[in-house]
Amino acid sequence: MMTHDKVTIGKTDVRTTPLGLGTNAVGGYNLFPDLRDEDGLALVKAGLNQGIQLLDTAFVYGMGHSEELVGQAMHDFDRHSFALATKGAQDFSSGEQIINNDPQFLTQQVETSLKRLNTDYLDIYYIHFPDKQTPKAEAVGALQRLREQGKIRAIGVSNFSLAQVKEANADGYVDVVEDEYSLLHRDHEADLMPYLKDHQISFVPYFPLASGLLTGKYDRTVSFPANDIRSQISDFQDPRYSQALDAIDQVRPIATAHHATVAQVVLAWYMQNPLVSVVIPGAKHPQQVEANAQALDVTLTDADYRLIDTAFAAFKHTANGKSLADPD
């Protein structure tokens, strides 16, 4: 296993496997119903035991609870054997959520994340969402000062438009961008991803399996309860839903040929995509983490890669770039 070369994040010395683990279902009780802490702990440990070397969490996953659980789970492992990423920008000091990129606020957020994660440095810290008022280069400047203090190794921004990324990178400090991207959400291929490649900025897609839709487990008769995040996602509503299922059906023979699942083949496609740095599928159970890790063993032929690319070509130009609305 682990046949892939390591990925370098931006212009830093942070190195990781091209497959990471997204942990919004680890302690993210505000995002998913019926989560259990012991499952979250087990799946983080499963990821590290499988050799996955990037854990991706955020303050807003359970309002710090995900960070606490990730911090507990990684306690049994060599801290230098994996990279740890977290995100912040949500300010609840007024009693309601406000997005805040103020340098002083971000500095305080990093300090509290370090405490919850029980570590003295973060490999990547992302500004989770852009606010409307803070000059982006000033926000990144605060993170650069923390980098100089050894508290952050790589600086990231998440959910920033291309114009905001350019503003944030005015001094060349941005190393990595995290945003939604999948075979069903490909609009970033036109402008954002080429800019990042040209500027040696890594790209980490979230929702790579499109909330499970790209695993191939759904059929044409599906519905979700109102408290399930998928009930609000356009991918699960026609005509997008039917188009997605048609494209997924074209992946099934490739998966069979590789003795792999649809999800493993989709993850392998991202890992072979030159515009993608690290893919971070989420999971709810250790078995899902272990299955995702097996995608590292799948090597698609050029013909496989092109066939998948073509099957999902209709999703390259969609007005629907995001599954969910960004917070104001």
Image: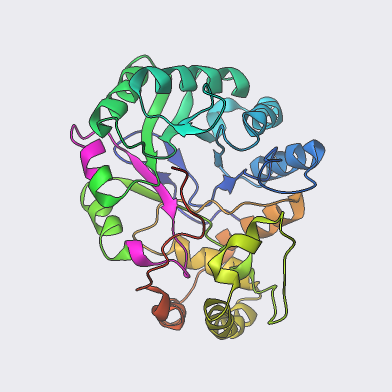
Which residue occupies 47% across, 68% down?
Answer: 269
Q: Looking at the image, how many numbered discs can be counted on the residues?
A: 0
User: Is residue 178 inside the magenta stretch?
Assistant: yes
User: Is residue 321 inside the magenta stretch?
Assistant: no
Placement of the N terminus among the 4 image quadrants:
bottom right
- Which residue is most to the left? 170
In the rendered view, tell whether residue 93 sits above or below residue 47.
above
From the top left corner, tell me how far across and down residue 73 is, in percent.
70, 31
Q: How is the image coloured?
A: rainbow
Which residue occupies 48% across, 55% down?
Answer: 4
- On screen, residue 152 versus residue 163, left or right, reads right
Q: Is residue 246 visible?
A: yes
Q: Is residue 118 visible?
A: no
- Which residue is most to the top? 149
- Which residue is most to the front? 95
| Residue sitting nearer the eye, 68 or 323 | 323
Which residue occupies 34% across, 59% down?
Answer: 275
- On screen, residue 140 versus residue 260, left or right, reads left
From the top left corner, tell me how far across and down residue 129 is, in percent.
41, 40
- On screen, residue 2 versus residue 173, left or right, reads right
- On screen, residue 109 versus residue 167, left or right, reads right
In the rendered view, tell whether residue 62 sits above or below residue 226.
above
From the top left corner, tell me how far across and down residue 264 is, in percent.
60, 66
Q: Quadrant of residue 310?
A: bottom left
| Residue sitting nearer the eye, 209 or 223 | 223
Placement of the C terminus among the 4 image quadrants:
top left
From the top left corner, tell me how far across and down residue 207 is, in percent.
53, 57
Please report the bounds of the magenta region as a residue range.
166-188
